[in-house]
Amino acid sequence: MTAVATEPVASTPTTTPARTRARNPHRLRTAVLAIIAYVVALIFLIPYVEMVVAAARPNDELENPGYLPTHWNWSNFRTLWSIGLGTNLGISLQVAAGATVLVLLVALPAAYYTARNRFRGRTAFLILVLITQMFQPTAMLVGIYKEFLGLGLINSVFALILVNAGFNMAFATWILNAYIGSIPAELEEAAMVDGTSRLGALFRVTLPLALPGVVTALIFTFISAWNEFVVALILTTQPNKQPLTVALDGFIGGYQIDWGHLFAASVVATIPVIALFAVIERKVVGGLTAGSIK
Amino acid sequence: MQPTFRTGASRHVRRLAPLAWIGPAIGLIVFVVLLPVVLMFRTAFRNIDTVGFDHGWAGWLNFRALFKEPDLGAIVMRTIVWVVVVVAVTVVVSLALAQLFHQRFPLRRVARWALIAPWAASVFMTSVVFRWMLNSRSGLINVFLHDIGIVHTLGSSQADWLGRPSVAFWWMVGVAVFVSVPFTTYAILAGLQTIPGEVYEAARVDGADGWRSYLTITLPLLRPALTVAVLINIMNVFNSFPIIWTMTGGGPGDKTATTTIFMYQIKASSIGESAAMSVVNFGIVIVLVAFFVRASRGTTQVDG
């Protein structure tokens, strides 16, 4: 760090004329880079802007080849609830919230214990977690279907919570393990010397310090359960028991596709999630390095 | 602290203590991840009819039926192309974008934020929008391609990209790249941030600049980040379901299906054969992981 900071000062006297000349190309370079970056950013946003535009297109303009509708019609967002999609949104919310809570209850103790203790089977457990992180429900869809069919848990929110928690737990354990591992155990020991119990030390000392990791793990779990599609597609058959993604898939399978409501519901489901993700953007970068790049 | 002073019973308790902490995690993994694997293998060797009635042990019957499927060869080839092309293009595009978003420019944070959208949004919904934007008469992409003169007539068969299997496949490859790039770019950006500026200063002193310093310094130092990103992408792309499912359904017939889609397509008619396809997919996944871990050994470590 020091070397970088002092280097330009040392070279200033000899290179002053060159520097003034170089500043303009430098500024031009920044401008060009910025413009390219803005265009790229725009390209990545277009599908989601189009989602809003399509939701606000009047029905008789759906086949019009204009980029924008001649007038905006926001009624799809109101009638969304009367055609039953509110129920599906509610189920998505239950599944995502349930899975998030379950992941926290299960992953936090495991991550804490493996970060603080060496014990027989610790490596085996961490490898098991790592392997499940590689697995995706799609790969074992038939098995998941057979299991929950046998248990009579088709069309059950509980089944969806379990599966989503199971497949997201690995990531949460891994990231929490890394965060807690980076917090010195001495801090907890100091608190315990002062008479705090082990659990007290965990909740009052370690958890607040590991909060960025906890938040990242929770938001990640919530979003992936909220967006989950294929497991819900095979585990739910009744329209009023399906999360939003599967309910909307039913729209597409229909003879006449109700694009207006389809996209209005997509907007309602997508915008909050993007905003939520943006909140943890920086921690996600840190989390990725901490969690998976060692 | 001396274990010799402890009684046998408390040593026993001590050995079981980890279970109180990691037991729930193990239980969840066993119930939701491992048990389905066992049931999937079991189903692949059972003779189950379309109503769901189990007629007993089937031996290799389901696998033989699967390998007799006339289109299986084409589907496997398409799956290989799908994974290799999507992951390769994703990595190349992401390397470029990460370099771009690593530079300093005004509103960088906002621009990076926009990149998050396809990562945060559900792949299912993103695919639905792309299907809508490819509508032959009024889709945004087609209207744009018409404006710049690539599409000659809106509503023509030329504009019906998803109607022709060979063309539809490449559009879906594009969508898969689109949804994979954000995560990959962020993983590479995280990798770039771990490279200290001093390294470049030293290289500049040695006369390395631009491309040379990128190839000799940046890329090698990005290897751990790239390894993780590629591995995760291979898994995601191989198991990718919503893109093909929403845009063509794998059709017409199975002309745009990958093995993952095909597994779902045959589930209704023969769950045993579908399970056999899953077992084959599962084998492919394990081979891919093993191959990749071996190829990049030394760069990733399980910190156990």
Image (cartoon, coloured by chain):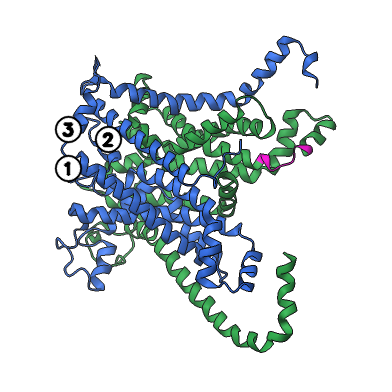
Chain colours: A green, B blue
Q: Which residue in the structure is indicated by mark 3?
A: B68
Residue A185 magenta? yes
Q: Residue furthest top?
A: B8
The N terminus of chain A lies in quadrant = bottom right
Q: Nearer the viewer, residue A169 or A67?
A: A169
Could you tell which of marks 1 and 2 lies nearer the N-terminus? 1
Q: Which residue in the structure is indicated by mark 2?
A: B263
Label 2 chain ID: B
Could you tell which of marks 2 and 3 lies nearer the N-terminus? 3
Label 3 sits on a secondary structure element that is helix
Q: Residue furthest right?
A: A194
Query: In 3D space, how far apart are the residues under numbered discs 1 and 2 (Cα atoms)?
Result: 13 Å
Q: Which residues are magenta?
A: A180-186
Q: Residue at x 51, y 61 (%)?
A: B112
Please give left or right for residue B157 compared with residue B47 in the image. left
Q: Which residue in the structure is indicated by mark 1?
A: B253
Label 1 chain ID: B
Asked if the residues shown at circle 1 and circle 2 are in contact, with their CB atoms under 8 angstroms apart, the answer is: no
Q: Nearer the viewer, residue A27 or A77?
A: A27
Residue B293 magenta? no
Q: Residue at x 26, y 30 (%)?
A: B274
